[in-house]
Structure formats: C-alpha cells, structure tokens
Amino acid sequence: MPRTLETGLKDRARSLLLTFPVLLMLTCGRTETPPERPNFVLILADDLGWADVGYQGSTFHRTPCIDALAHDGLSFSQAYAAAPVCTPARAALFTGCSPARLHITTVYGENTPLEDVEDRLDEGAPGTLVAPAVRERLPVGLPTLASSLRELGYRTALIGKWHLAPAPHAVGFDVQIGASPAGAVASHFSPYGVPTLRDGPPGEYLTDRLTDEALRFLRENRGRPFLLVLSHYAPHTPLQAPPELVDEYRARVDPRSPQRNPLYAAMIERLDASVGRVRAELERLILTEQTLLVFTSDNGAFEGNRATRRSSAEEEPVTSNLPLRSGKGRVYEGGLRVPMVAWGGLVRNTGRCSVPVIGTDLCPTMLALARHAPLATSDGCDLTPLLTGHGTLERDALYFHFPHESFASALRSGDEKLVYSWRKERDELYDLGADPGEEHDLAAERPERVAELERELFAWLDAVGADRPVRRAPKESAAPQR
C-alpha cells in the first residue's frame, strides 16, 4: 500500500475514533429526562404575521431558517398572541398573566392613567365609548419569567425591544441591551437613537447588531443556565432594510400578490438570518440538547400603508394576513394568530401541532421545565405535554380582551370563536375549522350557543377583574367605572 494512502487511512480512522464519542452523545446518548436546569432562548419578532413566513405559505418572503426550525422542531399552527398589540402581549409573555388581569390592555404611552378616567368621561358626546384606564407599569412585586428563573441561578438577558415599564433590570433581567420604553426605533440603521444601545458604525443594521449581542451572551454564559430573550424591533416600522436586499425583492414583486412590499420582505429575511445564526451558535457551543428555543411574534401583522409614516418606503401595503381576517389592533384571527415554533433537545415531539396555544403559556412552560413552582397568578398552561408528545392541554377556552380602538373581546372554544363588540353591543360567531377567515357569521343561526359563549366570556371578564369600556352619560350622571 502506498505510504500516502496508508497515512490517509490512518488519519481517517483516528478522526472517526475521536468523533465517535461526540456522535454518541448527540444521538444514542439522548435520554428522555430533560436537564434539571435547561436553557431558554425566546426570539420575539415585532408585528410579524402568521402568514409572513414560508412554512405558513408565504411565497414572497424568504424564511429558510425559520422554515428549517419548523421542520426540525414543533410548529404551532394555531398559536395566538395574548393581545393584538405589543405592550399587553409582551406583558403576558413575561408574566403568564392575561392582559385583562394585569390591567395592561393597550400600548404603553398611548393609554389613560387610572386617575384620568373621570376627566375623560366628562368630555365628548353622551353615548360614545370611552376606553378604560390602564396601568402604566407591571405591578410591583409581580413574579416574572426572568425574576423566577434568576431565583434558580439563571443568568437572564433582554436584548432588544421592551416597550414596558419598569425597565428590564427591575423585573429580573441581569442584562438589558437595546431596551427602551418606546415601541419603535428612529432608524434600523446606526445611529439608532436607543439609550441602552451604543451606536455602531454608520450603516450597521439593527437586526444584525442585536443578534451579535445575543451571540456574545451565549458564548459568555455557556457554562451556566440562562434565559435569553432576543426581542427584535423588526419588522415593525419604519420599514428599512439593506438596499441591495430590497432591490432583490423589488425585482421579484408580483403586483397581483397580496404580499408585495420589498422593504418589509427584506426586513423579514434579515430577521430570518438572525434565527439561523442563533441556532448555529447553539449547535456550535453544543448547547442544543439542554436548550429550548421558541420563535414567535408579539401580535399579528399590520396590513395598512403605514410604510410611509416614518420612511420613504414605496406606497404598498405592509403585508397581508390572508387567508386570515384583519390585522394588528383587532381580535379577529389576523390580529391575534402568530407564528410559533419550539426547537431544541427538550422538544421530543416534532412536526405540526394544531392545538390552540397562547402567549401566556410560555412563562409557565419554561418555569415547569426549570423545576420552578407554578406561579399563583398564571393564566397560561404548561405546554410540556405538547413538546413531549405525551398528552394534551386541559383547557376549555382562550380569551382575549381589547377594550380600545376596535372595542372588542373574544373567546375561542374548540373551533368556535365568539367576538363581542362593545361598540355595537352584539356578538359574532365563527367556526374556525370550516371558516378560518371568519367570513361567515353564524350568530343568527346559533343563538343559544352565542348566549352560552357570551355568558362564559363575561364570567371570565368578571373573574380576572377586567376593565371594560364605558359609554359617556350626561354630565350630571357620569361616573368612573371599573
């Protein structure tokens, strides 16, 4: 045998022997017992719609990394945000409490403090609706996902958008980078105008920069349990993306397609690349088996022409939530349904899951996996039975309350969905199994069922102490209501 060939075979054999223990650890060594203190990574998009990703049917937006995550993990086809706008949905994610229970039901900075509600009732024409007052801050002392995990020795980080009060440090996050009480950035290119994020070189793109910070956190904390929340500002307005990528999408636009905004699509592609980079780093650090990664969005996508509000984006709708109805700020499916994928060694049940889940479920799920006692205030369910494939959820219904702007509340029970309009004081009923686009109102055909579901919805509102919109009365009889 020639010397070079012999040497090559020996080197190959030596390489296989060295690699075998690693392969054994990654495959045969995998057990059904999760680690006592698993790691958690939550990647949160801002205003990304259910239909904006490839695995949910989008053909214009390129999301290969998110699609691969869905293929290799567990994708929830009927996942819901807890509210159709960001602040209450995020509050629910981090506390496990419904926005109605928290009295945080609309966007931070655009609500009415509790002490001002009486003045608002004295203004305007009698009979018109007044949105209820809401809390400006998370309740003092309320346990959060971060504070609860920190009790167990976790290192916790919030990188990116916050849009809540108080600051992340005050509710259990050891690290806060890029967090701000504002709902959007002045620019997705440096300088960003974010007080907690040092500006990068001119032209640096925010999505990429936040991902850099997240990867640094992973490397620095690989030897201890951690919670990383990578909370992107994308694809929220202002719509801005690298020009060369925008040009690629502009060349692919089909004017007949409901999704055709090249700026929005380019933002999503950079978001997708971020997901791929985080996954690759977890794999490189050999952390996959002891980590649960969840990717989701804070609410449904905004469909209108807001692209031009803070930028020079082309005059195109931001996106389309079709086949779902409506979008952000509404309790129809387009405003509430979001993409959600779970991936990592703690996910034993891969594929597609059609069980309805909601943002309030993530906090109790992660705490249960970390062996933390359930929080007394939690409204969510532990999703572990779905992640393992051993069981389902014991839950009768999902509830939503948005007493602002569109003035509506909703309940989903099985495939039936009740939408109650506070402005019209009437119900709509839809069969989501047959009609996911909520086109056919069945309320007139099923009055008894409507009455039953309305009673259930109002009983839940009472149980959580939900604040309801009120009608302005003549000044002599006007009074604040809670």
Image (tube, rainbow, N blue to C red):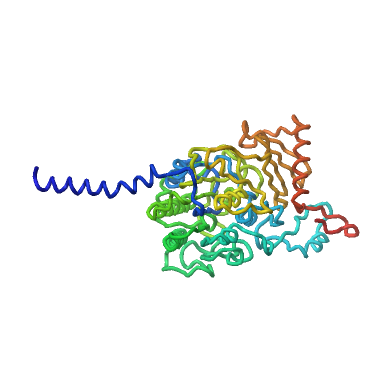
Q: Quadrant of the C terminus?
A: bottom right
Q: Residue at x 69, y 55 (%)?
A: 105
Q: Quadrant of residue 252?
A: top left
For the question of whether residue 158 can be seen, the reply is no
Query: Is 203 left or right of 448, judged from the image as shown?
Result: left
* Image position, residue 11 (x, y; %): 19, 49
For the question of whether residue 21 can be seen, the reply is yes
Q: Residue furthest right?
A: 476
Q: How many marks?
A: 0
The foreground one among 295 and 361 is 361
Relative to 459, does residue 41 appear above or below in the rendering? Answer: below
Q: Quadrant of the N terminus?
A: top left
Query: Is 46 left or right of 205, judged from the image as shown?
Result: right
* Image position, residue 384 (x, y; %): 56, 44
Q: Residue at x 45, y 52 (%)?
A: 275
Q: Quadrant of residue 141?
A: bottom right
* Image position, residue 407 (x, y; %): 73, 49
